[in-house]
Image (cartoon, grey):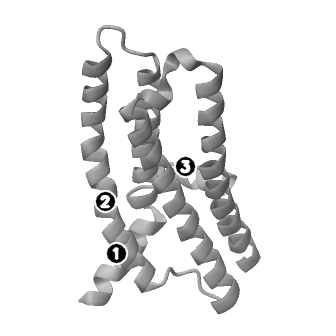
Amino acid sequence: MRNRVLKRLSYLSTGEATSLIMFVFISYLVNYTYPDLRLYSLFSFWSSFLLLEFLLLQGSIYWYIKWKRLKRENTSAAPIRMVKQLWAIKKWNIAMIIIIPAAFIADYYMWHPSTPQGLGIAAFIYTFAILEYVNYFHIQLSYDNRADINSLKQSKHFKQASLSKDFKRLKNSKT
């Protein structure tokens, strides 16, 4: 069982880190291949992209620390200090999510009437970033293995996100 959890945590950590790096290259290739999209000229693209990258970095670090802790200390519980830091960062994430629509409005008015099609890509990235935020901090949206899918079918409810459980553990340790 421990080895299976170690593999899962390693998979999650490396997957998030790989996505973090891969999205940089993909954005460059898309911007280079389709310059008419004007991706790199859009505030909405950069703000949405940086939010997504910031969230992926948080996820990668979170899963890596849980993996490292299970490997060294035989517990996968996230350290309280890290949970507190992620709780503080959660507020920054929310602030960014709230502020980013202003970048879309600014881009629309700056480029109107010839609004670049890249605005649609930026909106997709923004939506994806919000889903990543929900997946990390509230409810698990990613079900990528048979056990998770079977659990979802049986319970007919989404699981609570691992980090959300850690926040509850933090809250309960204070009382």
Residue at the disc numbered 2: 92
Amino acid residing under circle 3: Ser
Residue 45 in the image: state x and y as whole percent. Answer: 43, 34
**Residue 39 as seen in the image, left or right of residue 2:** left
Distance from label 2 to label 1 (Cα)?
A: 19 Å
Residue 49 in the image: state x and y as whole percent. Answer: 47, 42
Q: Nearer the viewer, mark 3 or mark 2?
A: 2
Residue ID at (35%, 66%): 89
Residue at the disc numbered 1: 168
Name the one closer to the observer, 16 or 158: 16
Amino acid residing under circle 2: Trp
| Marks 3 and 2, the one that precedes in the sequence | 2
Amino acid residing under circle 1: Lys
Residue 21 in the image: state x and y as whole percent. Answer: 64, 50
Q: Is residue 61 at least partly visible in the picture?
A: yes
Looking at the image, is 156 positioned above or below residue 159? above
Looking at the image, is 68 positioned above or below residue 90? below
Residue ID at (48%, 67%): 162
Q: What element does badge 3 sit on?
A: loop
**Residue 89 as seen in the image, left or right of residue 52:** left
Circle number at residue 76? none
Name the one closer to the observer, 145 or 121: 121
Residue at the disc numbered 3: 142
